[in-house]
Image: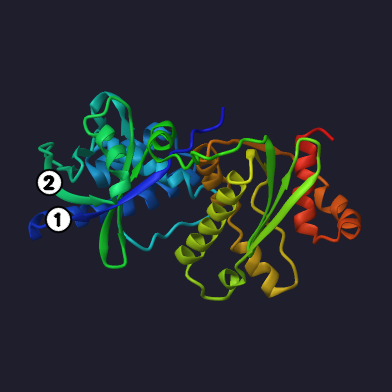
Amino acid sequence: MEKEVKPTIKGRLTVNSPTNRGLLLYVMRNFKDAIEYAHSLMRNGYPDAQIVKLLTSRILNNAHYSYSALIRARLYKGQAYLKLKKPQLFSVGKGNEKGNRNIRLVSTNTVKIKIPSSTGRHRWIVAKVRFGGRYLEVVKELVNAQFPYGAGIYLKNGRIELHVNVPLGLYVRHLSKTSRHYNSRGHVASFDFNSDRICMVIVSRDSDLLDVKTEHFPEVTSHGFPKDKAKDIRMKALTRLVSYAHHHGVTDYVAEKLSKPRTKTLSKTANRKIAKFALREYIEHLKILAPKYGGRLYFINPAYASIDAIPLAKKLGLDVHTTSAYLLALRYLNL
């Protein structure tokens, strides 16, 4: 069963008390160490229950934070070694405990954060949080929620941020981008994702190629280009394409079912593009955008699409990447 995608909304966290700020940063540093330790134990074959027990007794003094650290460590399971740069804190959602056991929204501008203690006398600190106005209706439903939501605290550009993982249905209900003048024509938008561009085609149900659009961003593969900035550029480009597709009658969105490319080449430039190729980020964002714009998302096996695209590209007068997107759409339409 595919894991549900949960969009993230971000707010700026303010901890006025120097003492509370110090306590929060201390727990965040411990949590970072716990993720690294969990990753090492996981790589050495320790069972999950034992990992949580070790994290609780040796570092975090809180079983739920320890389980959350294990969840974070799983994100890096493909790496042989893990060394995180910045402190962080994360708590998995808990529906029967007002949405979250350790990081809990108590109003649209206030959050309580549990500070664990080795004596068992855990304490709560209260901090202010400021979300963008368009997210307030979503946040209202998270206050004392009866469903789980994940929450994390991170350092970014000298400030502290609260990231909240929102159920997709709730997010779409309040933040849908479906136009009042939307004319659903049942068209299909198909994508070909690359490290430095996104190619999209819009195809009718009769397989007619109606439109082609490509977003280029070659700078993101440059040496030393900031990772966060590259992701922001890619995600904004994808949002523009989905918005365009929505306003041109698209209801179905098609993407390739593909893992991150790992093949090395003799070209340093090509290897850098491969290393920076963020297919998972594209897919996760598209899983949010499709329902947000009133559409449905489908994944198609892209086997041999690139090979088949070469002769067809010459015939259509398109590049290979755009033609690959067109072939995915045809496969979706079973043509």
* Quadrant position of the C terminus in the picture: top right
Badge 1 element:
loop
Query: Residue at image x 86%, y 53%?
Result: 307
Residue 30 percent location from the top left of the image: 26, 52
Q: Residue 302: tell me if it is visible.
A: no
Quadrant hosting residue 145: top left
Q: Residue furthest front?
A: 181
Q: Amino acid at mark 2?
A: Ile
Observer-nearest of 117 and 292: 292
Give how far apart the Cα atoms at labels 1 and 2 are: 9 Å
Which numbered marker is on residue 125?
A: 2
**Percent position of residue 19, x then y:** 8, 57
Above or below, comparing residue 68 to residue 39 in the picture: above
Residue with the mark numbered 1: 15
Pick whichever, 26 or 137, lies toward us: 137
Amino acid at pointer 1: Val
Identify the image quadrant of the N terminus. Answer: top right
Identify the residue shown where x is 35% and y is 47%: 9
Q: Position of residue 172 (x, y in %)?
A: 43, 36
Tell which of 197 and 173 is nearer to you: 173
311 left or right of 101 in image:
right
Mark 1 in CB contact with mark 2 (< 8 angstroms): yes
Residue 202 percent location from the top left of the image? 71, 47
Query: What is the secondary structure assignment of the residue under circle 2?
Result: strand
Q: Is 144 on the left-hand or right-hand side of 72? A: left
Q: Residue at x 81, y 53 (%)?
A: 306
Upstream in sequence: badge 1 or badge 2: 1
Q: Is residue 309 visible to us here? A: yes
How packed mark 2 is, by other alpha carbons closer than 10 Å (few <14, some 14-19, many 20 or more), is some
Q: Which numbered disc covers residue 118? A: none
